[in-house]
Amino acid sequence: MDRIRDLASKKAAVIFTKSTCCMCHSIKALFYDLGASPAVHELDLDPRGKEMEWALRSMGCSPTVPAVFIGGEFIGSTKDVISLHVDGSLKRRLINARAIWF
């Protein structure tokens, strides 16, 4: 869990994904469309990916990917990010964390 927290705090926007996950791809595309350049950690390509996936699960991430952090804070998975985007607060969070400029 310390590794997750460490990686999540190193950049304004961080997404833990799997390279074969279509929802992960959609969330990454949304961030790029909003102008963010998140740190992306592909768990299925990382030698410690299984360990990180278990840590995400213990943090309450279900499903474990995509797991999105903004400003070091766990935001949630796909449905949480889409809800924030629909109500307009995702962009504001990215601006406040300095992941994007406006």
Image (tube, grey):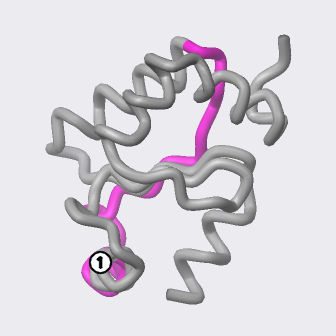
Name the residue located 50 percent from the left edge and 87 percent from the top edge.
1
Name the residue located 62 percent from the left edge and 68 percent from the top edge.
7
Query: Residue 39 at x, y = what percent?
Result: 58, 47
Query: Residue 51 at x, y = what percent?
Result: 32, 86
Whether 49 is among the magenta residues is: yes
User: Considering only vertical position in the picture, is 48 above or below 14?
Assistant: below
Circle 1 Cα neighbour tier, 10 Å, few/some/many (<14 / 14–19 / ≥20): some
User: Considering only vertical position in the picture, is 46 above or below 79?
Assistant: below
The number of discs equals 1
Name the residue located 59 percent from the left edge and 28 percent from the top edge.
90
Residue 78 sits in quarter: top left
Query: Residue 81 at x, y = what percent?
Result: 43, 36
Question: Tag 1's secondary structure?
Answer: helix
Q: Quadrant of the C terminus?
A: top right
Mark 1, residue position: 57
Query: Residue 84 at x, y = what percent?
Result: 49, 30
Q: Which residue lies furthest to the front in this view?
A: 87
On screen, residue 86 versus residue 33, left or right, reads left
Whether 16 is among the magenta residues is: no
The one of 41 and 34 positioned closer to us in this rendering: 34
Name the residue located 58 percent from the left edge and 88 percent from the top edge.
2
User: Considering only vertical position in the picture, is 56 above or below 44?
Assistant: below
Amino acid type, callout 1: Arg
Q: Give the range drawn in magenta.
A: 34-52
On screen, residue 25 versus residue 21, left or right, reads right
On screen, residue 55 versus residue 63, left or right, reads right
